[in-house]
Amino acid sequence: MSTFVVVHGGGDVGWSWHLVAAELRARGHEVLTPDLPADDDALTLDDYATAVVEIVGARGDVVVVGHSFGAFTAPLVAERLSAGLLVLMAGMIPAPGEPPERWWEESGYLAAAKVQSALDGGLTGNEDPYVSFYADVPRELADEALRQERAHPSSTAMERPWPLAEWPQVPTRFVVFADDRFFPAAFLRELAQRRLGVVADEIPGGHCAMLSRPVEIAELLSGYVR
């Protein structure tokens, strides 16, 4: 069976993936959901990748999963580990040399979110995280996720160019959450095609579907490695 290692998103912790991890383990897989370093403004994307690689160690048959901002770190991890598969879920797909802080405009996100927000009455990009991130998540899980929020990534990681000159030579899949109110599904499908040449898969759920749709996510991930 495979070893899945999850690179969580900005402000997040590995706990957010505990329901998916349980489902994957029930299917016979090993799952690592590390908390990436936080509260240190000097750390870089390479530092985050190093922290994950050290946790994985000598394990083989690795599948790297990156969620949201984790898409900036996950490819670095996948390259270093010669992973068998890289899966980005609602991921901020970086371009070579693109600092994360410039992704919002250069990817086309700002324009796309503005259009979608006008269509849905301000739900997309809403300042209330219960609306934009956790709309379909049980309240107690959303509350706990917010309690665990941390200062990740650092300003240094946001400012420095993405370090890879090209996408790693690792098979890559991209997953869109159909009800995402943070990254509109149509925008992410187009971004995956434009930046990766990948046709995205889609499952129901909002931006934090790992807390609302763990069975569906585990089934999809398991299917990728069958």
Image (tube, rainbow, N blue to C red):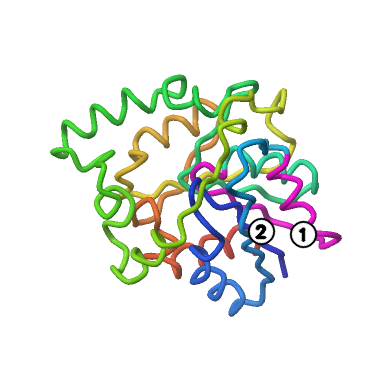
x, y percent for residue 131: 24, 51
**Amino acid type, label 2:** Val
Q: Decide: few, some or many residues near mark 2? Use Cα within 10 Å; few <14, some 14-19, many ≥20.
A: many
x, y percent for residue 193: 49, 30
**Amino acid type, label 1:** Val
57 or 146, which lies in front? Answer: 146
x, y percent for residue 77: 72, 45
146 or 222, which lies in front? Answer: 146
Whether residue 66 appears in magenta in the rendering, the answer is yes
Q: Decide: few, some or many residues near mark 1? Use Cα within 10 Å; few <14, some 14-19, many ≥20.
A: some
- Which quadrant of the rendered structure holds the C terminus? bottom right
x, y percent for residue 143: 34, 65
Whether residue 117 appears in magenta in the rendering, the answer is no
> Helix, strand or loop at disc 1?
helix
Q: Residue furthest right?
A: 58
Instruction: For marks 2 and 1, give the CA distance.
Output: 8 Å
Mark 2 and mark 1 lie on one chain; the one further toward the N terminus is 2
- The residue that mark 2 highlights is 5
- Which quadrant of the rendered structure holds the N terminus? bottom right
Quarter of image, res 156 = top right
Q: Are marks 2 and 1 in contact (CB under 8 Å)?
A: yes
Going by the image, does 62 lie left or right of 24? right
Residue 56: assigned label? 1
